Image: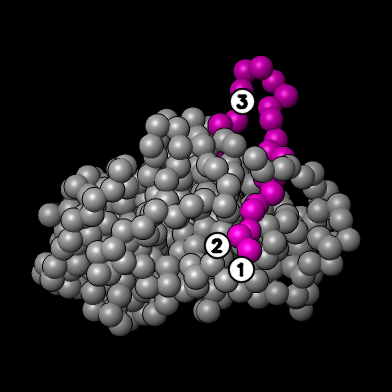
Amino acid sequence: MSSTARVQTCPAVSVRRGSTSTGAQRMFNFHFAGSSSLPVAILVALLSLESASAQSSPPLHLEAIYTRSLPDSFAVTGVSASSSGAVAYWAADQPYIIVDTDTQRHVIEAKQVGLPVAVAVLGGDSIVEVVDGRTPRIIRLSMTGQVLGERSVDLPFSIEHGARANGVWIVVGKDSANIKVMSIADGGEVKAIDSPSPLTSAWSRSSAYITGWQAGYSVSLIGSPFDAYAIDSDGSRTPVHFVQPLLPESDTSSYQPLWISMPIVRLETGFLRTFADLRSDTRILVLYDDHGNISRQTLIRSPLGFVASLPERRLLIAIRKSDQLEVVGYRWRRGVGDHDTNHKETP
């Protein structure tokens, strides 16, 4: 069970806006239900914990470098980023996948996929692999939608989410109330992964996220109790267990927040996790150190959530809703900025 921590306010991180492109989009699955417009100006300040180590943690500055739009009917249910910089988006109710590379957008027909639950761009941005949660199987497609191959996967549960990590698929599903994690090698070998701590969830929808990077992955519960851990794929480091933040409760009987967690994303050092209230625009952004301790935290009232990252490029991918849903790329940097962090800049 994760422990909790209290925070004090100490502005530390600003968000600035770069170039953008516009277009109509729908909500990011259920995470942004009931969202209102994004404020004209926003300052995201990650707040320091009441501890010496937290107060000495360097601030994280974010600058929006692009905004990308999706078709009006495309209700995004997942986002993944590859080491090449390609970003893939998929929707449970649409027969195609969208991939944005550094130079162009690809719309890839995927009618043969029953329920996409994970997507990875491979082969120098020439191949897309899709995990079908309905069959289950893994389908390999070209950027033009040609089926290059597929392989069935024999698992004791239905796949709910997955990610590539260190050259293999890591997938997660739910068996009764227990969270199960397994690896799927490209050669077809399937292995059960022993969790460093038991994960159970009473959440009635999808139970957990997997987020992968070059050398490891994280597993995080979507619903309470929000337990989560990160691990190196080769087991060379001690697993990281994440401290649960103290999420605010309503002081009125007429309204109670409904908190869920969005994926844990990797930074060059540490991690970032977004908690979202499904009944409002309130978000809690939590910055963790490499040991899973909370170093900074803030509450914002804007429909924003970080869903993927490219640590080697210092790039964070966020879902943000104003009048439309936007996918925003943020470049991050550490340390004290050359301007007053209390100054608000238009995102």
C-alpha gap between disc 2 and disc 1: 7 Å
Image quadrant containing the N terminus: top right
Count of marks overlaid on the render: 3
| Cβ–Cβ under 8 Å for marks 2 and 3 | no
Amino acid bearing label 2: Ile
Callout 1 secondary element: loop
Magenta region, residue range: 238-260
First-in-chain label (2 vs 1): 2
Query: In this figure, which colouring scheme has been used for the structure?
Result: one colour
Place residue 291 in its image quadrant: bottom right
Give the left or right position of residue 313, taking residue 6 as reference.
left
C-alpha gap between disc 2 and disc 3: 34 Å
Q: Mark 1 highlights which residue?
A: 237
* Numbered label attached to residue 280: none
Q: Mark 3 highlights which residue?
A: 256
Callout 2 secondary element: strand
Image quadrant containing the C terminus: bottom right
Instruction: Tell me if mark 2 has few (under 14), some (14-19) or many (20+) residues whose alpha carbon lies within 10 angstroms of its own.
Output: many
Observer-nearest residue: 43 or 109?
A: 109
First-in-chain label (2 vs 3): 2
* Numbered label attached to residue 231: 2
Amino acid bearing label 3: Gln
Q: Nearer the viewer, mark 1 or mark 3?
A: 1
Amino acid bearing label 1: Arg
First-in-chain label (1 vs 3): 1
Q: Residue at x 38, y 37 (%)?
A: 175
Callout 3 secondary element: loop
Q: Residue at x 68, y 27 (%)?
A: 250
Instruction: Measuring from the top left, give residue 89's x and y in whole percent.
Output: 33, 60
* In the image, residue 170 above or below residue 26: below
| Cβ–Cβ under 8 Å for marks 2 and 1 | yes
Instruction: Measuring from the top left, give residue 9's x and y in whole percent.
Output: 81, 51
